[in-house]
Amino acid sequence: MHYYLDFERPVAELENKIEELKRLADGKDMNITTELKKLEKKARDLRADIFSKITPWQKTLIARHPERPYTLDYIKLLTEDFIELHGDRRFADDISIVTGFAKFQGINVAVIGHQKGKTTKGRIERNFGQPHPEGYRKALRVMKLAEKFGNPILTFIDTPGAYPGIGAEERGQAEAIAENLQEMFMIKTPVIATVIGEGGSGGALALAIGDSVLMLEHSVYSVISPEGCAAILWKKNGTEVKQEEFEKASETLKLTAQDLYTLGIIDEIIPEPVGGAHRDYQETARAVEKVLKAHLTELMKKPVDTLLEERHNKFRMMGAVAEELDN
């Protein structure tokens, strides 16, 4: 049974009808093949129509879908011989970030990514994918190991943001993020960052300084969530922020993969199955694998000096503004 978002209700009704028809016919001498095919085609066409015109706010909801594949799913589908590494060697092991080494297309790589958790218990244990500073320090420790062994680094980004709790701040949350940003610019091995769901603020950016920055079709990447932006701009005297304002903020933030590709922030958009990545893990993984392989092949051909120079220039050029001066 799928979890449906509000704007998917017409599809939900059709697909529930299909499931009901299958249940009724189970074990009975009923020929429902023709009717099923008609309903399934109608559901596919309706889903394609809905997803051809979704708004940035709706994309945000898809990026947060609880059935969406997470880092551990991609590790399972894309890599072999994964060995997870734990702990930052300073304070603790933060399991909202998964780190380790594996083989991707026969190449030894380091894999690092946010993990939200699949069940209620898992989400609580993994802090809903919101890392503490020890998570970022663990990630950097593994990046340094990858650099030492000459292994490329694959990061998978899916977080609402770094955890803003008092304990995290006391243990140096901002410093941990800042150190990751600084060090990732100097890592002497290829780095590919892929936004697979939510790319929230510095908590996402701390794993996203890459030679190639990729995004799944229905992922989002922004300095602040639409809700946070709307609350700052439009919340007055304790009143609730309306959904229309979430939608307005989503549009203004330019947080979709399509917007960010147009602005030159990311290098490529990875297509998802119609209806989102959660509809077909295998198809999504194949698309991710194809794009990762192409980028990794090109990056591994480059000398280290060229790699570092291009990485630095890539991020220096982001946000450039052209001004027209009056004569």
Image (spheres, grey):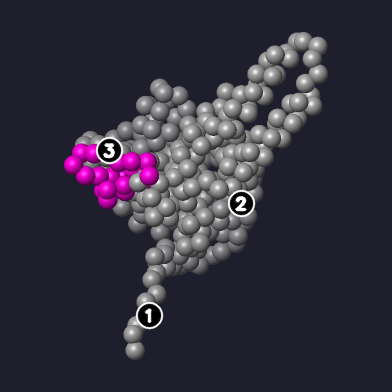
**Which label is found at residue 249?**
none
Disc 3 target residue: 240
**Residue at image x 79%, y 27%?**
34
Dot 3: what SS?
A: loop
Disc 2 target residue: 291
Q: Are marks 1 and 3 in contact (CB under 8 Å)?
A: no
Looking at the rendered structure, the kind of residue marked 3 is Glu
Answer left or right for 35 relative to 306.
Answer: right
Quadrant containing the C terminus in the rendered view:
bottom left
Asked whether 241 falls inside the magenta stretch, the response is yes
Badge 3 crowding class, 10 Å Cα cut-off, few under 14, some 14 to 19, many 20 or more, is few
Looking at the rendered structure, the kind of residue marked 1 is Glu
Earlier-in-chain disc, 1 versus 3: 3
- Residue 6 percent across, percent down from the top left: 49, 34
Dot 1: what SS?
A: loop
* Distance in Å between CA atoms under marks 1 and 2: 38 Å
